[in-house]
Amino acid sequence: MAMNFVKRFVGKALIFVSGILALAVWLGLTVLAGRPGVRQMIDVSPQARFTFSQETEDLLTEVRARGLKIEIDTFYVALGSVPQLTVEQKQWATVLQRIQSLTTDLLRVYEARGRGAVHVEHFDEMREVKRMRERREELRARQRNSIVVSIGDRHKELILDEDLAAIDFPNPNAPPTPGGQRWFARLDTYKGEEAISSAIRSLLVEGTPVVAFLKGYGEATILEGVADSYSELAGALADDGFEVRELNLRKTQEIPSDVDIVALFEPTRELTDRDAEILLAFLRHGGRVVLNVSYRDLPVDHNPTFRGFGSRLGFEIGSELVLHLVKDPRMPDAPGRAGIESQTLDTVLNPVHPITRPLARAGRAPQLKIARELRTLAERPEGVHVDLSLLRTGPYAWLAPRRASGGTTDLSGPRDASQVAVRSVGGIIDVDPETGDRQGHLVVLGGVAFINAGFASNGDLALNIFNWLAARQELVTVRGTRYQSKRLELNEVQTRRIGTLLGWYVPGALLALALIVYWRRRSS
Amino acid sequence: MSRAWTTMLRELNGYFFNPVGYLIAVLLYLYRGVELSAVVETVRDIGGRDVEEFATAYVLQFSSLIMIVLVPPILTMRCFAEERRTGSIEVLLTAPVRNWEVVVGKWAAAFVFFCVLWIPTLGVLWLLTGDSYLATSIPFSPVVAGYLGLVLVGAFALSAGCFFSSLTDNVLLASLSGILFGWGLISLPSFVTPYVDTYAERWPLLESLLAQMNVFAQLTQWFSRGLIDTGHCAFYVTGTAFFLFLTTRSLEARRWR
């Protein structure tokens, strides 16, 4: 009896112990399979949106090798707080929700691929008000629907619906479609990897190049809250690790030795000979300059041509406005027609230069609203190399003269075919150094207000210019796979048919099958 | 192995010629139809949405959760509990078949029937792409990945159901235990994770384990998006093996009574 009891007890104890051991093995295997070095991710998503580009993989490898930690904080707008009364508002909320969802997915992959080097923190706008506010203040986050990428003390804020996605907004002037279909804002492209990897890369770059924006020429400001300000560019430069400051040559008489790049945006007054000489000397000593001209219809004398500065460097800036014929859909074989839309130029980017190559590859040529032409001078000073192929117009561009009476711009179109041609609106002038081997570079842009007014679409070009001038070649790039959104739209008839299929036909077929089985069972 | 195969075929025959299984399917598909019709109406009302979102929504509905929480215990509740209740388990255990072959055979039959229950949803999705319905192509890859996740969770829940069924001769108790287990599997990790996150730095192993066990997050954030993590798959496969092993041991324990 006692022997039997012992045998049974030992037998049950052995089974219990084997169960415990099996549990330990299972949990151990589960933890092991989840280890960063062991787990593999198989991406079968549409457009392989979870598969990182080699550049992003290399970037994360570099981060791990340097023992750095990337913190990514998300500050999504709570969709419950977005008004959703009209169809347009509902659709906008849907677009935001999709971008948030794509971003969350992508950040999860960053975390997994980062193998401990990337940590993502999601903040709930509704539930974690205090914690979120404190973190936002700490990171100096200004936007509501954004993510902030941080490495150490440096951080960069990315706005979900501007930096991470391209949204197709409806044209309010578009004619109604047949059947009265309404158009809404819709997600066109999601470019999260490109934006986040670029942000990480910019935070990894060491050193702080100094950009000095020149003052004193009636130029556009970089101050926030001022009309036509370049504050967005200045902010983006600061986020990219530049130190941004203002410089008045009349006060300093020279360019400070710690300044790497001098920028002058949309001046309305000519440079004096003395200032031109200071800039030339700066270029001769390996300095870098960006000049973006302006165009005013009136007063006419607010359109400096920089003749003195240009003649020293072998280029000139035309005083006329560049216009381009607009394609007429009714006459597809004709070059196009003139009109108010002619002021908008679709540019052609230099496919080879490091500034424009990545944009050209991605098919992201900037669109200029108005521009002035750049031309080379026959007489070229020694040690100066002029290349005006950075940004060009299409083949049917002409120069709009000013009317004799009043001086306003005449938009009536070219008088004859000989007036249309490809025209340059952006170029680079390389200046050989007097001493040393650092070449000076001047980037001249004839496009007016295209960086401040259209920073969302043209900002990459501007940042590429500054990064190239600062010799930070690694930042002059656009990378990452993009996700093209494909939409599903349904009408009343389709909805009804689907409802009938799902609610009646499918359960009905299964019910018929159940009856057949029941009947066969009974009869057998 | 052939004896496990024979057991599976015998069990499968029972599943397919029992109208109760079909009635469960009718109710589920009716509910699923109502749910998906609501999704379609929302798409119409808001003026459209991303096709991939529709594909994800198609896979993961509340009815899908019902399928993985309620159906496995219902399928497995009779596996051993009924045999114990009627006494036929003694016949089974004295037959020239090993305990593990009985367990694997019964589990495999339930698994095959569980997979068959999902097939109409794929057929319906294929039908929906037609010109009369959605009139667009749907990305099938996240759908397939989503189904893989559901099938893996189902296999795991079925093995746990087999185990609970082997512990009792009460069919209702076996099914209730399975349902509680399934519900715990879906909801518990999501509930516990925020608390554990506080101590994540102190107990990284626990955090990692919880992440691996977070079934709901894996289904909604990984599989249904078209991202398959081998770590997650390993959790289900080894978990299934673990419960099948426990079931075998449980049958073994009868020898010591």
Image: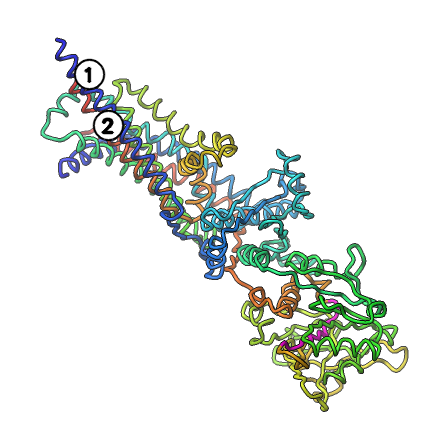
- Which residue has dot 1 on it? A9
Amino acid residing under circle 2: Ser
Q: Earlier in the sequence, mark 2 or mark 1?
A: 1
Image coords of residue A311 (percent x, y)? 76, 85
Q: Secondary structure at mark 2?
A: helix
Image coords of residue B133 (percent x, y)? 46, 50
Could you say which is closer to the camera, residue A453 or residue A419? A453
Q: Is residue B213 above or below residue A447?
A: above
Q: Say which mark, if any, is on residue A18.
A: 2
Q: Is residue A1 left or right of A499 when viewed as pictured? A: left
Query: Crowdedness of circle 2 by 10 Å Cα count: few (<14), some, many (20+)?
Result: some
User: Which residue sits at x=51%, y=57%?
Assistant: A483
Amino acid residing under circle 1: Phe
Image coords of residue A435 (percent x, y)? 66, 80
Image coords of residue A295 (percent x, y)? 79, 73
- Most frequent secondary structure within the magenta stretch: strand
Q: Quadrant of the C terminus of chain B?
A: top left
User: Tell me, what colour scheme is on the image?
Assistant: rainbow
Numbered range of the magenta stretch: A438-449
**Chain name for mark 2:** A
Specify whether residue B59 is painted magenta.
no
Q: Residue furthest bottom?
A: A378
